[in-house]
Image: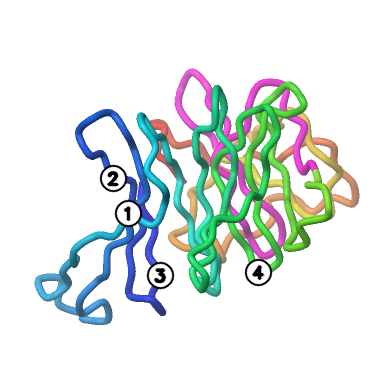
Amino acid sequence: DIDACASRSELAAIHNDGDGALTLALFPIENYESNDPSLVKLGEPRFPLDERPLDEVRHPRYSPDCKRLYFSRQTGNDHDLMALNLQTMAVEPIAQESAFELYPAPTNDGVYFVSARDGSMSVYFQDLNPTTDPVRVTHALTGHHYPVALPDGVMVGRLYSTGLHMHHQPFSAAPATEPTPLATPVALPASAATVTKVTEVAEVTSITKITEVTNATKV
């Protein structure tokens, strides 16, 4: 699980040190802007987090301005959402309920993430004000995964027997329960920024299905 920041010429990745621990590693990228892949190389990693036995860090994601690096980390029997301030290298708590908080998807205004705090894996949004509470975006009966921020809403994945299906929750919609699939799925575009609403509705109560990924590919 990796992410990259162009302005820092840096790669964030999960490192397995061989003793069962998964920790955060930051790799400098040499010749990041090169068009020749053979010239792009990773430097020696650094490990910005405190060491913990049997650590488990997941889903590193840079904020759009690359000032924070969001990730989830096991704390006790669940995972909490945290952010590494890349200017001070201090770790900031984002969501620390006694439930799983996973899959950060940062935006300019905050971060989407998935939490089981209300009984099911639903999508929430936390703005940049640490004194405000997260807003619940979807109401999953089973579980929503891998949120992706879009200009007009958020895309989420839901696992079915045939794989991971992607669904779109527009900003104008009420909090969604279970998705309403389309009769014919459409292809996922190469750039998430080009996704458009599948249907124009004044008011909806369910997510609109965009596509299905039969191999359960992460988005």
Residue sitting nearer the eye, 150 or 14: 14
* Residue tagged 4: 108
Question: How far across and down, in percent of the image, does residue 31 sit?
Answer: 20, 79
Which residue shows up at 48% across the image and 48% down it? 187
Q: Mark 2–mark 4 contact, CB under 8 Å?
A: no
* Residue tagged 3: 5
Q: Mark 2–mark 1 contact, CB under 8 Å?
A: yes
Which residue shows up at 63% across the image and 50% down it? 93
* Mark found first going from the N terminus, 2 or 1: 2
Query: Start and end of the magenta stretch?
Result: 136-165
Identify whether 20 is placed above or below 67: above
Crowding at dot 1, Cα within 10 Å, few <14 / some 14-19 / many 20+, comes out as: many
Quick one: SS at disc 2? strand
Residue at the outermost right position: 202
* Residue tagged 2: 15
* Mark found first going from the N terminus, 1 or 4: 1
* Mark found first going from the N terminus, 2 or 4: 2
Residue 162 is a magenta residue: yes
How far is mark 1 from mark 4, CA to CA? 24 Å
Question: How far across and down, in percent of the image, does residue 17 sit?
Answer: 22, 39
Q: Mark 4–mark 3 contact, CB under 8 Å?
A: no
How far is mark 4 from mark 3, CA to CA? 15 Å
Residue sitting nearer the eye, 31 or 43: 43
Which residue shows up at 90% across the image and 46% down it? 203
Q: Mark 3–mark 1 contact, CB under 8 Å?
A: no
Secondary structure mostly seen in the magenta stretch: strand
Crowding at dot 4, Cα within 10 Å, few <14 / some 14-19 / many 20+, comes out as: few
* Residue tagged 1: 25
Question: How far across and down, in percent of the image, does residue 201 sit?
Answer: 84, 50
- Pair 2/4: label in front: 2
